[in-house]
Amino acid sequence: MDERDERLAVVVDKSRAEAVIDDLERAGVYDADRSVREYDEGSVSVPVTAVPDAVDYREVVRQVGEPRLRDLADYLRERGWTDAEVDRAPSSWAVLGTVVLVDPGDAPRPGELGEALLDLHGAADTVLARGPITGAHREPDVTVLAGEGDTETVHREHGTVYAMDLAEVMFSPGNKAERARMGEIVPEGERVVDMFAGIGYFALPMARAGAEVTAIERNPASFEYLLENVRRNGVADRVQPYRADCRDVLEQVDAATDVRADRVVMGYYEAHEYLDSALGALEPGGVVHMHEATPEALVPDRPVGRLRDAADEHGRSVELLETRRVKGYSEGVAHVVVDARVE
């Protein structure tokens, strides 16, 4: 078999597809111009540009049949969608393990949209319509559009494994770069407090980098997945989990159990309301990462001002390191992160 054949693919178990794609991308042989396809019951063929040397697969095959449909629009037109209807389809979505998460907006016939997304992403088995995140526990609202309807999945991202149930816990695809960044900036052995840990969004990449992480989460469902993800990523010796309100954990006065931090992560849009607790735990010279949903006209003045005001009340000074726009939060509102050193 010609190793440079344009239709080469490797056959793997469907449950391993995402992990294998990650490995193939790192090896530089994943062919993103072709689709992952169903091969037989329980397995898929993943397109490659050459036979990989160090990736575990069952066999190498040639993908046969019609050329790959290039995008979602092609699959929708196959279902009879007009150009005007295709224009109303979403332009972006997220693939999280075996689940496609999408905001259908005002697209017609959402069920057909879901089926088209399943055709486009052969390793996925469920498409969910994403609704708002609400409540004190940041609970999602999702609806099954197509497929098996299994909302539980395992997602790999930059080497970190996240198990989750998207009907019970939130996962923001738009925060991908920020999750990776947090794993890159922490030195080994640094003491980190993640005040709103969720399923381990930031705690896991930091712990994998060698940080000692206190991970606090009050949502019971998220906390259960946090515990599972700590085990899956092999960082149980570096993560101390608490199911509690972060203020209750950080405001302990017993010197034997007092939590101190070289770095505090505040991954919550209203994080400024918790600055007293964060600054109480942060050692002089420590770094805080404060997230906020900020109107564009108030970026960066509002979040920076809130941090400086809180530090002043504690008799501390702030050195601004960076202000980052992570993504759009809503129309005219940005998801912003303020990085600052507090003396």
Image: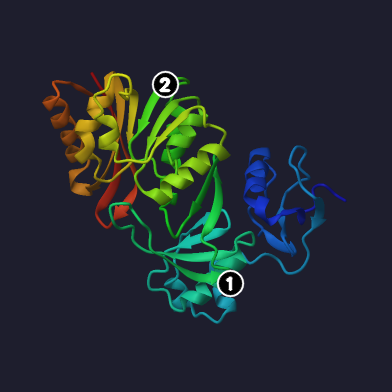
Where on the picture, by quarter, is residue 286? top left
Q: Residue at x 48, y 34 (%)?
A: 205
Residue 194 coordinates in the image, percent (x, y): 36, 34
Residue 202 coordinates in the image, percent (x, y): 42, 37
Q: Is residue 74 left or right of residue 329?
A: right
Q: Amino acid at mark 2?
A: Glu
Q: Amino acid at mark 1?
A: Tyr
Q: Above or below — where is 12 with respect to 72? A: above
Kind of element beneath mark 1: helix
Q: Above or below — where is 230 with respect to 152? A: above
**Mark earlier in primary sequence (1, 2):** 1
The disc placed on residue 190 is 2
Q: Residue at x 72, y 61 (%)?
A: 42
Q: Residue at x 54, y 67 (%)?
A: 149
Residue closer to the observer: 82 or 291: 291
Where on the picture, by quarter, is residue 39? bottom right
Q: Above or below — where is 2 with respect to 42? A: above
